[in-house]
Amino acid sequence: MRVLVTGGAGFLGSHLAERLVAGGHHVTCLDDLSSGHRENIDHLVHTAPYLADSGRFAFLECDIVEPLPDCGPFDRVFHLASPVARHVERPIATLRAGAEGTRRVLDLAAECGAVFLLASTSEVYGDPDVHPQVETYAGHVNPVGPRSSYNEAKRFAEALTVAYARRRGVSVRIARIFNTYGPRMRPDDGRVVSTFITRALAGRPLPVFGTGEQTRSFCYASDMVEALVCLAESDCDRPVNLGSPEEVRILDLAREIIDLTGSASGMEFAPLPEDDPVRRRPNIDLARRVLGWEPTVSRREGLQRTIEYYREEEPLE
Ligand SMILES: NC(=O)c1ccc[n+]([C@@H]2O[C@H](COP(=O)([O-])OP(=O)(O)OC[C@H]3O[C@@H](n4cnc5c(N)ncnc54)[C@H](O)[C@@H]3O)[C@@H](O)[C@H]2O)c1
C-alpha cells in the first residue's frame, strides 16, 4: 500500500514508518522538523528521489498548516503531525496544526479515498474525574488553562475527523494515545521518562512534581505502533484508547529508573504544574475486543531498552 505518515520524522512517526517499510509498504513521511529529526528516518531513505518508483520511502519537509505538496495518492494516511512536548510554548502553532493542518490532511485523504487515522491523545480527557478512562467519557478539560491549546486542538481534530466521515464519507480511525515512550524521544522535551533517564545517567536529581503520588500509564513504542497499524486495518470508526493499563506512581517510576540505571541520583521536588492530571489510565477493553491488541512489552523491559538507547546514542537535542 501507499502510506502517508505526517509527523513521520518524530518519535512515534519514525517507528511507525520503519514498521510500515518493513511490512512492504511504500511510505512517504511529511514533517516540518520542528521537533522531529531527519536522523530518525535517514536509515529509511533509499537513494531514489521522491516520487521515483524505485524507492519505498520518501521524505518531504513541509508544514501541514501550509498548502500540502502534490504527493498522493495514498491508501492510508496516519496523521501524527502536531507540536507535542513543547506545546505550552507554541500554543498558536499547536491550535493551527490541530485545526488547519488536520483539515488539509483530511482533504488529501478524502481526495485519494484513503483511510485516515488521527493520532489523538488521552489529553482529550483533561484532568479526568472518571477512572480508568473509557472512550464514552467526554472529559474534564479547562479550555483556557496552560495545557488547553494541545487538549483543545486534539478535541477539535477529533470533531473535524468525525465531520469528514459523516459529510464526506472519509473512512476514519481515531487513536486516543496514552503516554508512550522509547528510543528517539528527545532528551530535552520535558517528558517524564526521557527527563528521568537522562538525569539518572548524568547523576543529577530527578525532578518530581508535587508529592509524586500522581499516576501515569506508560506504553512502549513498538506496542503502540502495532496498535496503530491494527486500528488502521480494522473497521472501527469510533475513538479507541491505546496505551498501557498498568498504572504507576511517578515516585515509583523515578525509583525504578534510578534502580535500572544504577544511578546515585536522588530526587528533587517541585510544585505541581497547573491542570496536571492526577490520575491517568486507559480502559483498553475496546482495543482488546476490536483489535485483539494489548501491550506486550513490560515496563521494566521497555525502560531497559530505552536506557540502553540513551547510553549508546548521543540523543538528539
Ligand atoms: N508519545 C506520546 O506519549 C503521545 C501520547 C498521546 C498522543 N501522541 C500523539 O502522537 C503524535 C506523535 O507524537 P510524538 O510523541 O511522536 O511527538 P514528536 O514531537 O516526536 O512528533 C511530532 C512530529 O510532528 C512534527 N510536526 C509538528 N508540527 C508540524 C506541522 N505543523 N507540520 C508538519 N509536521 C509537524 C514534528 O516535527 C514531529 O516530528 C502526536 O500527534 C501526538 O499528539 C503521542
Image (spheres, rainbow, N blue to C red):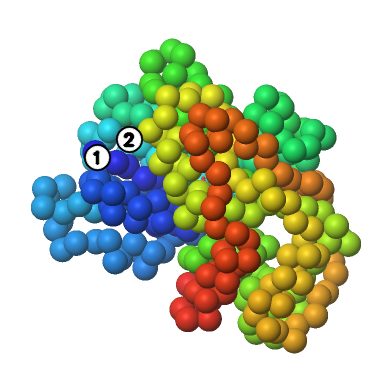
Q: Could you say which is closer to the camera, residue 231 or residue 74?
A: 231
Identity of the residue furthest to the top in this view: 167
In percent of the image, x 45 and y 35: which residue is there? 231
Q: Is residue 268 left or right of residue 240?
A: right
Residue 76: mark: 2
Q: Is residue 301 above or below residue 141?
A: below
Quarter holding residue 177: top right
Q: Residue type at mark 1?
A: Arg
Q: Is residue 261 above or below residue 71?
A: below
Image quarter hosting the N terminus: top left
Residue 16: mark: none
In percent of the image, x 47 and y 55: which residue is there? 222
Residue 25, image x and y in percent? 25, 46
SS type, badge 2 = strand
Residue highlighted by disc 1: 2
Task: Decide: few, some or many residues near mark 2? Use Cα within 10 Å; few <14, some 14-19, many ≥20.
Answer: many
Q: Is residue 315 above or below residue 276?
A: below
Distance from mark 2 CB to nearest ligand 1 atom below 8 Å: no
In percent of the image, x 29 and y 41: which residue is there? 3
Q: Could you say which is closer to the camera, residue 93 or residue 284?
A: 284
Quarter holding residue 234: top left
Q: Residue type at mark 2?
A: Arg
Are the residues flagged by discs 2 and 1 in contact, CB closer than 8 Å? yes
Q: Does the rendering let one see residue 171?
A: yes
Q: Is residue 5 above or below residue 134?
A: below
Q: Is residue 278 left or right of residue 101?
A: right
SS type, badge 1 = strand
Q: Which tag, 2 or 1, sits closer to the chain's start?
A: 1
